[in-house]
């Protein structure tokens, strides 16, 4: 066997079960915390902070602007990771610093006893701090993934299990947070009390899970930094990498649009459930559970990948998305005058179809962006893992910013903040001991009964039709622009290893010649 062939074969390092589970399980607490803040912070503000429509609009603009800042902050963090060298490696220190500091910030934002515009100002400042601390953790955690294995099947497996564990964390938040903050099982009888308590508990879980990853994952030794490595502006570097890597560029666009489309329903469905089926958090949780369980289909993604290629899988995903959103819209409108709570179940169950489609398609994009590391190395000779993997959260946060803008406009037009302002008043009266939890629930049900049916229907239309349109765009772009299929990946990896082998042989020959000259 030639030295080049030996190098190719030797490069097939396999992923250990130890690293697979130590890395993946760390994502449970991480996404539990992220879901608490990213999904339910706005709910907390509307239900406990007494903001009116104008103040809510300001909150929406603040979130949108801060998420854009957060996205632009990602490449800076990626570049810092690239030059980090410690006994714990380059990823682990930032994982833990981010987890601890972010947990403290989240608790303060849920706990602070400010209301109205005073809270809005505090929120604007602290949201920037939140974005910085979470970026420390997020970029370093996901940048570790491609460094653990370059084997095609192992990377599929690691990506799948890691996304499943992240989904479990997000799913737990979907179950726990609404159930324990609104309705009959609210902690302390008031959302004003419940949210800070959950922030403490989830923060501890977040830190514990990330500590497990940092202690248990075994990384490959890091090469020393090149002392002649040029200093670069991280934002310029990210645009430079995007300019030279067309596949990364298209994947970033697709992930941005995907994150916009797939999150619109999440921003509106809570209010649809409350106004259609009553102020009971368990109903919101059940809605999330029935759709979230469908995301567990990712556990069989490696089996799907063996039977279908990623282009075929993407087409199947789009069909499932149409079925899910279409059925939800049709059932919701057809039963708008039916008062039975049993209508809830077919509406929620229809979400399983779009949930499967969106989750599996996102998995395809996660693998594609991981493969962009090899594509970059194949084209330029540089892997740039930290920079490239900063694109995933960058696209997610830009998509989240756009989603916040869309949701804010929809909720403002429908006057949702004027309704929740009345609900917030009831929640705070309980917290001050002026009414009982039972009286609060009765008063809130009377408030909800006054919500016009047209408002409920428009919520349903917006949370189904818009995602269908947007998700169609993402799949079409992927099918037309992505070339990083399974065959291309194997070709790139083979070329890279052959190139490395040839370089090693050339270096060896030079050393031999120098030795002969010396003696």
Image: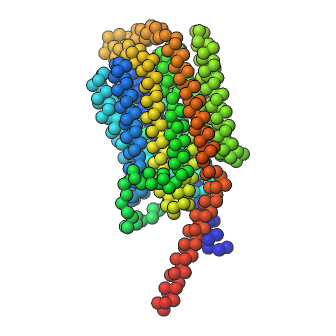
Left or right of 278? Residue 95 is left
Front residue of this view, candidates 19 and 408? 408
Front residue of this view, candidates 364 and 27? 364
- Answer above or below: position of 420 versus 82: above
Q: Residue furthest bottom?
A: 519
Q: How is the image coloured?
A: rainbow
Question: Picture coordinates of residue 301 (x, y %)?
Answer: 64, 43
- Answer above or below: position of 399 versus 481: above
**Which residue appears at 47% of the width and 47% of the height?**
391
Disc count in the image?
Answer: 0
**Which residue appears at 59% of the width and 29% of the height?**
468
From this viewpoint, is residue 349 visible?
no
**Which residue appears at 63% of the width and 19% of the height?**
330
Residue 70, by quadrant, is top left
Question: Picture coordinates of residue 32 (x, y %)?
Answer: 47, 35
Front residue of this view, candidates 477 and 435? 477
Q: Residue furthest left?
A: 118
Question: Picture coordinates of residue 404 (x, y %)?
Answer: 44, 30
Quadrant where the N terminus is found in the figure: bottom right
Front residue of this view, candidates 29 and 113? 113
- Answer above or below: position of 32 versus 444: below
**Which residue appears at 44% of the width and 19% of the height?**
413
- Answer above or below: position of 159 versus 56: below
């Amino acid at each position: 066997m030639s030295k080049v062939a030996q190098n190719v074969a030797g490069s097939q390092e396999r992923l250990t079960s130890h690293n697979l589970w130590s890395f993946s399980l760390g994502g449970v607490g991480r996404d539990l915390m992220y879901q608490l803040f990213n999904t339910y912070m706005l709910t907390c503000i509307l239900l406990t902070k007494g903001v009116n429509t104008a103040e809510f609009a300001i909150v929406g603009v603040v979130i949108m602007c801060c998420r854009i800042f957060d996205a632009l902050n990602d490449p800076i963090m990626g570049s810092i990771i690239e030059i980090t060298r410690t006994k714990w490696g380059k990823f682990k220190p930032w994982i833990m610093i981010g987890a601890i500091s972010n947990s403290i910030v989240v608790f303060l934002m849920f706990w602070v006893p400010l209301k109205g515009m005073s809270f809005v100002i505090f929120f604007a400042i602290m949201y920037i701090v939140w974005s910085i601390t979470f970026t420390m953790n997020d970029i370093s955690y996901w940048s570790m993934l491609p460094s653990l294995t370059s084997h095609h099947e192992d990377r599929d497996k690691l990506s799948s299990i890691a996304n499943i564990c992240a989904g479990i964390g997000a799913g737990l938040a979907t179950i726990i947070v609404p159930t324990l903050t609104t309705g009959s099982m609210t902690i302390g009888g008031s959302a004003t009390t419940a949210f800070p308590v959950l922030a403490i508990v989830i923060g501890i879980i977040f830190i514990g899970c990330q500590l497990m990853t940092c202690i248990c994952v075994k990384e490959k030794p890091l090469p020393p930094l090149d002392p002649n490595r040029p200093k670069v502006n991280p934002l310029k570097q990210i645009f430079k990498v995007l300019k030279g890597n067309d596949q990364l560029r298209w994947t970033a666009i697709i992930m941005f649009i995907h994150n916009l489309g797939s999150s619109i329903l999440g921003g509106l469905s809570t209010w649809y459930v409350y106004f259609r089926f009553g102020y009971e958090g368990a109903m919101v949780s059940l809605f999330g559970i029935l759709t979230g369980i469908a995301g567990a289909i990712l556990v069989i993604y490696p089996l799907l990948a063996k039977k279908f290629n990623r282009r075929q899988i993407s087409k199947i995903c789009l069909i499932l998305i149409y079925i899910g959103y279409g059925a939800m819209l049709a059932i919701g409108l057809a039963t708008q005058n039916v008062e039975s709570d049993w209508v809830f179940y077919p509406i929620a169950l229809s979400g399983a179809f779009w949930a499967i489609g969106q989750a599996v398609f996102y998995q395809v994009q996660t693998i594609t962006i991981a493969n962009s590391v090899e594509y970059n190395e194949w084209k330029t000779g540089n892997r740039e893992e930290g920079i490239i993997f900063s694109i995933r959260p960058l696209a997610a946060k830009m998509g989240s910013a756009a989603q916040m803008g869309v949701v804010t406009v929809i909720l403002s037009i429908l006057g949702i903040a004027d309704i929740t302002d009345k609900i917030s008043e009831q929640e705070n009266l309980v917290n001050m001991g002026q009414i009982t939890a039972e009286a609060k629930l009765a008063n809130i049900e009377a408030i909800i009964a006054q919500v016009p049916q047209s408002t409920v229907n428009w919520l349903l239309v917006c949370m189904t039709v818009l995602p269908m349109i947007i998700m169609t765009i993402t799949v079409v772009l992927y099918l037309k622009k992505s070339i990083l299929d399974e065959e291309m990946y194997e070709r790139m990896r083979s070329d890279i290893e052959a190139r490395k082998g040839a370089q090693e042989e050339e270096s060896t020959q030079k050393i031999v010649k120098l030795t002969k000259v010396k003696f």
